[in-house]
């Protein structure tokens, strides 16, 4: 008996295969043979797809039961750029095949670690800051979303900054932001869908040197982006428990991290313990830009921002937490804020907008101000 794993993923030109999350070899790319443990009666072999220009399959072999040259059935499929079905494995005995995939929550669009069946629950949505959909817990996959017509949309927002959203709006509806610098690009926040068109456009803009996010509601399919570009994922240690799809690419940071020169992550707390912002010093023609997700949220009156523990459930933060956020941002120079959704931006005077909004917030939560 032998077991087959079909890996639908992009690989490097030299033919090295991406191992993804299985088997856990401790390396990002490999070829040849892996023996995971002396007690394990199987090993993994890498091979090229028949007639293909990419290595696109893993063969999991029960030792002594299967020799070299075994045919792949069905034949592996691959993409020259990035398949919508990235990081999904079909595996099992030749009869009675099982499916292992990375499921995505329909309500929050956070992708989970690969499993045979959808998870029983979404920890993100069951937390008081989010909610389980009114029709109950539902799951999807990136291929299913593509089949339903979801697609990526890339817009230039200013020189050196692009937004990446999903049309029609998916789950929470957030957009990603791509900061482009001479030292490389950083992707901030992440929707729950990814397709070839978005990856190709980001390649044209210089690829990715790093990935991060404001908070767990915006983790989306971060690992898919990481695998597409072999890019590290920088997430705050304070929110480690909310990483629903662990991956070797994840690197934990503490209170402050300069990802690239002039591109700095700063932990503010508030919404989540690890809620963060990204400071882009060269943005807004050198006046400085803050990418905030909803660590700080830009409200409908875009002269102001606000702060909440839960936005959908209207749970406020104490004034002391808001004051801490403002004090954390005080050393940063910025004149513009980009929020988590299209057009939720403070175009100028953003630093004073944050301070004024915090004063207004404190006045209302600490006692009714005079009209």
Image: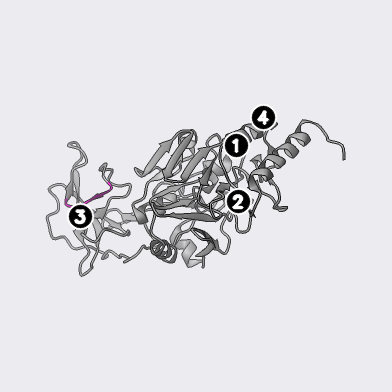
Q: Earlier in the sequence, mark 1 or mark 2?
A: 1
Front position among marks 4 and 3: 4
Q: Earlier in the sequence, mark 2 or mark 4?
A: 4
- Which residue extends farthest front? 286
Element type where label 3 sits in the image: strand
Element type where label 2 sits in the image: strand
Left of 183 or right of it: where is 68? left
Residue 200 location, x and y as percent? 40, 65
**Observer able to see residue 151:** no
Front position among marks 2 and 4: 2
> Where are the magenta residues, as a range?
28-32
User: Real-space Cα distance between discs 1 and 4?
Assistant: 15 Å
CB atoms of marks 1 and 4 within 8 Å: no
Which residue was labeled with disc 2? 336
Front position among marks 1 and 4: 1
Which residue was labeled with disc 1? 330
Residue 347 location, x and y as percent? 64, 55
Quick one: 349 or 89, which is closer to the camera? 349
Q: Is residue 219 magenta?
A: no
């Amino acid at each position: 008996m032998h077991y087959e794993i079909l890996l639908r993923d992009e690989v490097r030109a030299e033919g090295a295969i991406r191992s993804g999350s299985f088997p856990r070899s401790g390396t990002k790319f490999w070829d040849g043979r892996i023996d995971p443990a002396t007690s394990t009666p199987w090993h993994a072999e890498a091979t090229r797809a028949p007639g293909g220009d990419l290595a696109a399959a893993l063969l999991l072999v029960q030792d002594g039961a299967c020799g070299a040259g075994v045919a792949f059935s069905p034949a592996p499929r691959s993409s020259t750029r990035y398949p919508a079905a990235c990081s999904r494995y079909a595996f099992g005995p030749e009869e009675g095949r099982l499916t292992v995939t990375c499921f995505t929550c329909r309500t929050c669009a956070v992708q989970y670690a690969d499993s045979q069946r959808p998870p029983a629950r979404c920890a993100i949505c069951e937390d008081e800051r989010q909610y389980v959909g009114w029709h109950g817990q539902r799951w999807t996959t990136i291929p299913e979303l593509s089949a339903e017509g979801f697609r990526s949309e890339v817009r230039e927002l200013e020189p050196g900054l692009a937004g990446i959203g999903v049309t029609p709006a998916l789950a929470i509806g957030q957009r990603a932001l791509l900061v482009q610098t001479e030292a490389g690009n950083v992707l901030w926040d992440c929707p729950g869908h990814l397709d070839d068109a978005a990856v190709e456009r980001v390649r044209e803009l210089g690829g990715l040197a790093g990935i991060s996010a404001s908070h767990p509601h915006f983790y989306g399919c971060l690992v898919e982006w990481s695998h597409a570009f072999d890019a590290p994922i920088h997430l705050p240690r304070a929110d480690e428990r909310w990483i629903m799809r662990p991956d070797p690419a994840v690197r934990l940071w503490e209170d402050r991290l300069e990802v690239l020169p002039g591109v700095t992550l700063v932990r503010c707390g508030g919404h989540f313990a690890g809620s963060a912002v990204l400071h882009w010093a060269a943005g807004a023609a050198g006046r400085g830009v803050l990418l905030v997700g909803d660590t700080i949220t830009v409200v409908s009156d875009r002269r102001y921002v606000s702060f909440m523990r839960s936005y959908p459930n209207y749970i406020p933060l104490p004034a002391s937490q808001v004051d801490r956020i403002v004090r954390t941002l005080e050393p940063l120079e910025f004149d513009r804020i980009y929020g988590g959704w299209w057009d939720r931006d403070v175009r100028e005077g953003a630093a004073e907008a944050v301070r004024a909004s915090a004063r207004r917030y404190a006045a209302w939560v600490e006692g009714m101000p005079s009209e």
